Amino acid sequence: MILIGIDDTDNAESPGTNQLAKAIAKEVARDWKCERIVRHQLLQDVQIPCTTRNGAASILLSPRFGLDEIESQMLSLVHQCRELMKRSFAPGSDPGICVTSTENVTECVRQFGFRCQFEIVSMNEAIQVADKCSIHLEGLGGTNGGMIGALAAVGLAATGNDGRVVQIGEWIDDLTGTQPIENILSRGVLVRNIDDDEPISDGTVTLDKKLRPSLRDNRIVLFVQKHRVGEASSGYQAIRFQ
């Protein structure tokens, strides 16, 4: 499996980092299958430049080719991602990209990701961690500060226990509104009651704008809560986490 992290690619008027992550998955789809795209919430602080809420994105890919081709295909993947981001990132942003095999994402990378959620870290620290673990990390413009979030996204994604899933596999459309729970289950999403953590397979769920489940224990999980009395009688409300 391959993980890509991207960060700081947009400005207030441009499409967001999640949309660029989806474009990357589409761009490389001939050779790589998208398993999931996840938004990861990083620290919000006045000292950290960001467009809105300082979220980074990770893309998990699996190869469509023989593993003996992995080295050459990885080089091609980095090139494709780099060129697409150079064409797509917004003026005034400071984009960074990280590309690595999941095997290279060690505990120090995961801990780096956690730190980026609670404290300010430097670009030099990101570079040192990436070098230590033989992870490809580069900046593509501006201050290159997006390298920090790009590496953090990879570390957090590798935990299998962080973030909000914005694309499931190769389903590029979003479910919206009130949906039968069977429609959500059909996309490989586990639906659980947030009050008792029990799985739910019947009824309907009202989504918060779009289907945005969470990544928990390497499973894609939508947490829901029973509608209160006086609301839709047999349905559930989706709970949306950061």
Image (spheres, rainbow, N blue to C red):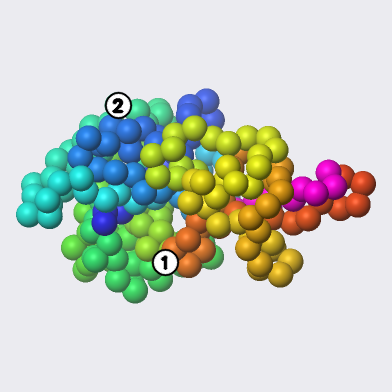
Indicate the quadrant containing the N terminus: top left, top right, bottom left or bottom right. bottom left
Front of the two marks 2 and 1: 1
Instruction: Tell me, yes or no, whether the highlighted magenta stretch contains residue 128.
Output: no
Q: Position of residue 161 (x, y in %)?
A: 48, 65
The magenta stretch is 232-242
Is any atom of residue 45 visible in this view?
Answer: no
Gap between marks 2 and 1 measured at Cα = 31 Å
Depth check: give the residue in front, 238 or 93.
Answer: 238
Counting the numbered discs, the total is 2
Give the number of the disc on residue 111: none
Give the quadrant of residue 22.
top left
Is any atom of residue 35 visible in this view?
Answer: yes
Give the number of the disc on residue 87: 2
Identify residue for label 1: 159
Q: Earlier in the sequence, mark 2 or mark 1?
A: 2
- Helix or strand or loop: what does disc 1 sit on? helix
